[in-house]
Image (spheres, rainbow, N blue to C red):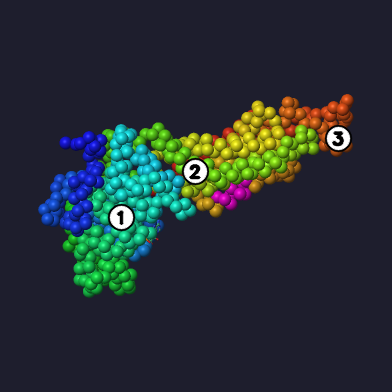
């Protein structure tokens, strides 16, 4: 019977102090785990619920997934990246993929994760308990990337909780999600750094090992069938690396997870933790089998390893020794494969192959790759074409009714809500940093002092224009450049999360736009308040109207920055494009020159600064805020020259004269409509680029 403490815990996630977990721990510490024999059980059978182990110890194995891949050949742009690669990994096992740099380890991992384009998989089949890899099964794979990609300003607790909220189904109660996070924290030993910021190269946060475990933790939340780890130990010291691999092994054993990891140069202690080994050499399979038997394989080839030598070092040295040795290893592997048993083909399993040029096949003209289904039992082959939307070769592609309900783990509203909270939290420290405040109010103060209480006279009209233009230009630049700097970093996280199917892009985008709005508007509001009143411009009503125009202008700048960032995807290029655009916009924004060469006149209509500046001038120069004429001898206006002082009263300039002199031609509503159009169009364009052009796999 479950105790109260256990009652809310999902059945599949035992506590770290559970008997299963303690047993796994004990077995690992005492080297009592045994790899399961290759082949043997029928592919479609569920692994027996209890697998006999050494010393009579039994392990619960009812939920495991056997993953088998055969004849995998990957070709990209006529380059063969993988050739005839086969293997099998059982629940509770760790398979290490090793080989020299560029051998094809990551390509193999990407292939197993279904993250290569359909057109690149030339031949091969990948099955999970006999079911061919399909969209539904892909969602049960967790892929821990080599880089630990997170928002640096969030704490580990926030990161895990947001991931749980996004990746665990809406139907799961909140308390259950919290318990799952607690469990991950305990299993991966992350408790002591739960409230530490993730950090990055510039700001200290989690240590390398903690970040790696956090990365694994975020992926494990979904209770995956297959865990793929790409170089999980890179950048870690040997003891942290060993502890990490041991943790993964413990998890594999206690949870019956199937683990495949690429690794560069494991220590001999790490090497002993691996159950199976897959050596890849120039895209070909150099060895597949028990890790403990790899040295026998090399010895049989006449390459004995010296006692006490790290087997991993020995293997890599041999693989890189010479072309001759390389050929010898591959020949040995070929011979070995003749006797190596993989699980038999499953009922629904087909080994697919793209037809060769000389083969004729029907219906090859519909644009997609053409595949051949080879039924090994009947000895038949059927050709058919599959569009880029997916392969139509397996009954396994069919989702269950529950899975059909949605491609995403959570609904749009949940995604929007969680992403809004997360974006707000992660943007807040950056936007409201002490230095941003110092910069904003420092510059605001300088502007206020420079143009302190501008007299309302004709000769100071340009000063009023100067203050307003500076506000528009300053915040235009700040928002464009901020978006250029922040968005590419965010794109990396977005890319990872989209590839793993966390959420809809539309939910992310909408959340980003709304969550940052209050933060975006706070600093320019403070800045304008300071400058406006120090410069003694107009009254309260026009102040709020000017504020509204400045907000629209700032958002237009941000939208432009997002668009340039998404279109360029390269910071340096984006800065160059943005600088040219913004300098052009500033120069043609109507303040520096009112006499633009006629062939350049059209450019000012592409400048959002122009619309914002002119809008502010219209708001500022009103009959209620009169500007008096200069003495007739110096006035630029005919009206002032002809109207001399009457009874000591200096005549005032009507606003239309001032606005005419400043070449303000469009009405206020046109300026506002154009600013809104800038915001909408550039944001929409940025979305379209992300949605249709910049698609992660
Ligand atoms: N999209 C691609 N187009 C062309 N060649 C590619 C592509 N992706 C990978 N390659 C090439 O395939 C080979 C294998 O790459 P892969 O990243 O799988 O190697 P790896 O064994 O993981 O290397 P490392 O240990 O250095 O990460 C490399 O020579 C690489 O240049």
Relative placement, left or right, of 241 versus 59 is right
For label 1, being within 8 Å of ligand 1 is answered: no
| Label annotation for residue 631 | 3
Relative placement, left or right, of 497 versus 630 is left
Viewer-nearest of discs 3 and 2: 2
Q: Is mark 1 on a helix, strand or loop?
A: helix
For label 3, being within 8 Å of ligand 1 is answered: no
Residue 627's quadrant in the figure?
Answer: top right
Within-10-Å neighbours for mark 2: few <14, some 14–19, many 20+: some
Q: Is residue 300 magenta?
A: no
For label 2, being within 8 Å of ligand 1 is answered: no
The mark nearer the N terminus, 2 or 1, is 1
Q: What element carries label 2?
A: helix
- The residue labelled by disc 1 is 244
> Cα distance, mark 3 to mark 2?
53 Å
> Cα distance, mark 2 to mark 1?
31 Å
Residue 274 visible from this viewpoint? yes
Relative placement, left or right, of 391 versus 556 is left
Q: Quadrant of ligand 1?
A: bottom left
Within-10-Å neighbours for mark 3: few <14, some 14–19, many 20+: some
Which range is magenta? 574-582
Residue 361 visible from this viewpoint? no
Q: Residue at x 80, y 29 (%)?
A: 652
Q: Which residue is drawn at 88% across and 26% down?
A: 646
The percent coordinates of residue 144 (x first, y second) are 34, 51
- The residue labelled by disc 2 is 429
Classify 394 as above or below 318.
above
Relative to the observer, which residue lies in front, 228 or 249?
249
Looking at the rendered image, the quarter that the N terminus falls into is top left
């Amino acid at each position: 019977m479950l105790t109260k403490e256990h009652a809310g815990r999902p059945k599949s996630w035992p506590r770290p102090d559970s008997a299963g977990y303690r047993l796994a721990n004990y077995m690992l510490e005492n080297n009592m785990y045994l790899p399961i024999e290759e082949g043997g059980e029928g592919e479609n059978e569920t692994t027996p619920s209890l697998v006999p182990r050494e010393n009579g110890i039994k392990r619960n194995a009812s939920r495991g997934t056997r993953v088998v891949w055969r004849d995998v050949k990957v070709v990209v742009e006529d380059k063969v990246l993988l050739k005839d690669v086969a293997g099998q990994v059982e629940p509770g096992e760790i398979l290490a993929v090793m080989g020299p740099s560029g051998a094809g380890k990551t390509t193999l991992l990407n292939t197993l994760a279904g993250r290569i384009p359909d057109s690149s998989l030339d031949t091969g089949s990948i099955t999970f308990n006999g079911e061919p890899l399909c969209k539904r099964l892909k969602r049960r794979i967790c892929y821990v990337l080599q880089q630990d990609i997170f928002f640096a300003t969030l704490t580990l607790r926030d990161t895990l909780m947001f991931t749980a909220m996004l990746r665990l189904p809406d139907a799961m109660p909140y308390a259950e999600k919290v318990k799952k996070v607690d469990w991950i924290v305990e299993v991966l030993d992350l408790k002591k750094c739960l409230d530490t910021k993730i950090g990055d190269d510039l700001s200290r946060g989690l240590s390398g090992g903690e970040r790696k475990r956090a990365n694994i933790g975020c992926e494990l939340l979904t209770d995956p069938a297959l865990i793929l780890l790409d170089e999980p130990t890179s950048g870690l010291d040997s003891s942290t690396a060993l502890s990490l691999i041991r943790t993964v092994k413990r998890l594999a054993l206690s949870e019956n997870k199937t683990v495949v990891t690429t690794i560069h140069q494991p220590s001999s202690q790490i090497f002993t933790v691996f159950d199976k080994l897959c050596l890849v050499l120039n895209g070909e399979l150099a060895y597949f089998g028990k890790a403990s038997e790899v040295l026998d394989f090399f010895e049989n080839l006449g390459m004995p390893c010296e006692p006490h030598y790290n087997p991993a070092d020995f293997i890599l040295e041999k693989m890189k020794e010479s072309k001759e040795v390389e050929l010898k290893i591959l020949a040995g592997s070929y011979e070995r494969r003749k006797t190596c048993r993989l699980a038999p083909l499953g009922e629904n399993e087909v080994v697919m192959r793209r037809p060769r040029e000389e083969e004729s096949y029907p219906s090859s003209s519909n644009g997609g790759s053409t595949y051949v289904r080879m039924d090994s039992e009947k000895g038949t082959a059927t050709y058919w074409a599959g569009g880029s939307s997916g392969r139509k070769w397996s009954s396994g592609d069919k989702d269950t009714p529950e899975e059909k309900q949605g491609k995403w783990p959570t609904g749009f509203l949940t995604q929007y809500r969680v992403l809004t909270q997360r974006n707000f939290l992660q943007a807040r420290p950056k936007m409201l940093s002490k230095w941003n405040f110092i910069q904003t109010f420092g510059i605001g103060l300088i502007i206020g002092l420079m143009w302190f209480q501008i007299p309302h006279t004709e000769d100071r009209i340009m000063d009023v224009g100067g203050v307003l233009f500076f506000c528009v230009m300053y915040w235009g630049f700040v928002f464009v450049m901020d978006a250029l700097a922040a968005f590419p970093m965010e794109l990396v996280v977005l890319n990872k999360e989209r590839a793993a199917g966390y959420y809809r892009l539309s939910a992310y985008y909408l959340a980003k736009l709304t969550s940052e709005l209050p933060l975006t508007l706070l600093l320019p509001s403070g800045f304008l308040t300071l400058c406006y009143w120090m410069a003694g411009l107009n009254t309260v009503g026009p102040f709020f109207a000017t504020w509204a125009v400045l907000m629209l202008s700032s958002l237009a700048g941000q939208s432009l920055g997002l668009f340039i960032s998404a279109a360029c995807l390269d910071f340096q290029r984006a800065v160059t494009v943005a600088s040219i655009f913004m300098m052009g916009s500033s120069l043609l924004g109507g303040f520096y020159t009112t006499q633009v060469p006629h062939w350049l006149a059209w450019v000012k209509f592409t400048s959002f600064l122009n619309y914002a500046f002119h809008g502010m001038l219209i708001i500022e120069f009103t009959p209620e805020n009169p500007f008096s004429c200069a003495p007739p001898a110096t006035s630029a206006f005919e009206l002032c020259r002809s109207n001399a002082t009457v009874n000591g009263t200096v005549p005032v300039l009507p606003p239309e004269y001032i606005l005419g002199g400043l070449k303000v031609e469009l009405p206020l509503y046109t300026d506002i409509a154009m600013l809104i159009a800038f915001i909408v169009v550039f944001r929409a364009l940025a979305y379209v680029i992300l949605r249709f052009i910049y698609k992660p796999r």
